[in-house]
Amino acid sequence: MGLFDTPPERRQIHVALAIVALLTATLLVILPLQDIRLVEVDAFIPIVSAVMFTDELFIGTMLCAQAGAFRSTALSVLGSGYIMTALLLVPFTLAFPGAFARMGLLGAGISSAAWLVLARRFAIPVVVMLYVWLKQAEAKVPEEERHPPSVLRAVLIAISLAVAIALLVIGGQNWLPALVANRVDGIPSHLLVVNSIILLTTAAAMVVLMRRYKSVLEIWLLVALSGCALQAALNLVVHTRFTVGFYCLYGMMVASNLTVVLALIAESNRLHSRLARSVEARERDVGTRLMSMDAVAAALSHEIGQPLAAVTLNAKVGLSWLQRRPPDTEMAAKSLQDAVDAGQRAFEVMKSLRTTFKESSELSEFSLNDLVRETAYLLRRDLEAQKVALELTLDETVAPVRANRVQVQRVLVNLLTNAIEALAGSRRHVRQISLRTVLLDGRDVRLDVTNSGKSIPLETMELMFEPFFTTKARGTGLGLSLSRTIVEDHGGRLWASAGEGHGATFHLQLPVTLPTTQ
């Protein structure tokens, strides 16, 4: 999973809303002060442009990299859009008066710079709307059937568009409406029109994205668009350079860009950390299985090798007695009987394998509630890695059960692991597993394991407990089957039912230890 397809959590949504609220509060504070003149700092624009260039180039590179991993044309378009807006900062900075020359190095100076920065602000919401449209189209095609996008071609298109826009603005300045009256003051009526168009376009992109957002990436795109909308609103009233409004306008641009970059870095690191823990757990599991297989192979070789060797040897001896002239049928029959006996010993070894490799069969009395808590603690890292909340509703009045504690814990681990894996692919905001114990008629205790993931079809419900039946890409189909066998060996039951509205519930029922009467 990546930023592209990981559903946002409530904490992430709350942080994003807090950032938008902070930017809005900043705008409200700036508005009454926006006309106050400040000292002219010519280095301000090159510094701001350098920071934003780095931010947007980083965002574009990250998105293009994920586009290749997820075979997503939508991501490649979004990434190339950010690369294009980053590249437009180069001619903007060169054209801005005072950045490198008093009247600018390109085009008509401040007028060319104004059109270039407006082109950047208009491009971002347009690219976001195109991303949403392409993602909707991709959702209808399985990932493995998609053609991988050409990231190099997308980057070349971004560079070409940036060059084309820069040439159009700089070379066609005489055909574009004037946005500034002089080096310091803008033309309010013209700025009002173009900024209103940008504001409406940005608002439309936010509406489209809010109706479709399903991932962490889209939450932070909403934050970026909110920053663009607030900047356009501030630009409606800021018509003069080197005022409080002017400096704060570019400050908000930098702040919103930095927020998105830092959020993407933090979320990428968090997802990488989860992936590393998942890979580590899988490697441990594979290592354990290989060790178990080695142990089984060694035991089979030792325990079955001897009787099978005896079968072969006795059969050869019996054959040699029969091939004599005259044949010694008595000795041949004796050798063949020895072969039969050796074969029977091999068969008995095969029957005892389950006893040989399972844990001690000793029964003991223990609290099922305590075992549930212990198992939940053992799996805490898996729960944290998948951001799954665990709810325990345990009836403390239930009597202890008499069973093999290790085997029952194996069943609990299997049920909890299946629930965690079911939630790993869920796009629901709330990922929760509920564990509930209840006493039934004073003779049995039932444990309900409920997850908030997808519902299980009725036709699949009973088949899940059949050997080798699995809905997982890499499952063996033996976990639930063995779990049911263990539970039934203890006089209990294990079955599944559909959850209330969504998810599934697995029910584990075991007999309790009844108090003895004197």
Image (cartoon, rainbow, N blue to C red):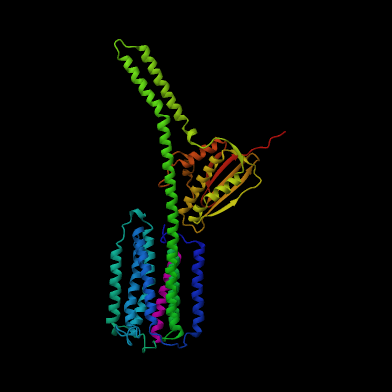
Answer with the quarter of the image where residue 93 lies: bottom left
Give the magenta range.
187-212
Up/down of 253 relative to 354, above or below: below
Answer with the quarter of the image where residue 341 lies: top left
Image quarter hosting the N terminus:
bottom left
Residue 326 is situated, as x and y percent measured from the top left of the image, at 30, 10
Image quarter hosting the C terminus:
top right
Up/down of 263 relative to 412, above or below: below
Residue 473 is situated, as x and y percent measured from the top left of the image, at 40, 47
Answer with the quarter of the image where residue 234 lies: bottom left
Helix, strand or loop for the magenta stretch, by majority: helix
Residue 82 shown left or right of residue 485 in the figure: left
Give the farthest residue toward the bottom: 182
Give the farthest residue toward the right: 518
Q: How many marks?
A: 0
Queried whether the magenta region covers residue 209, the answer comes back as yes
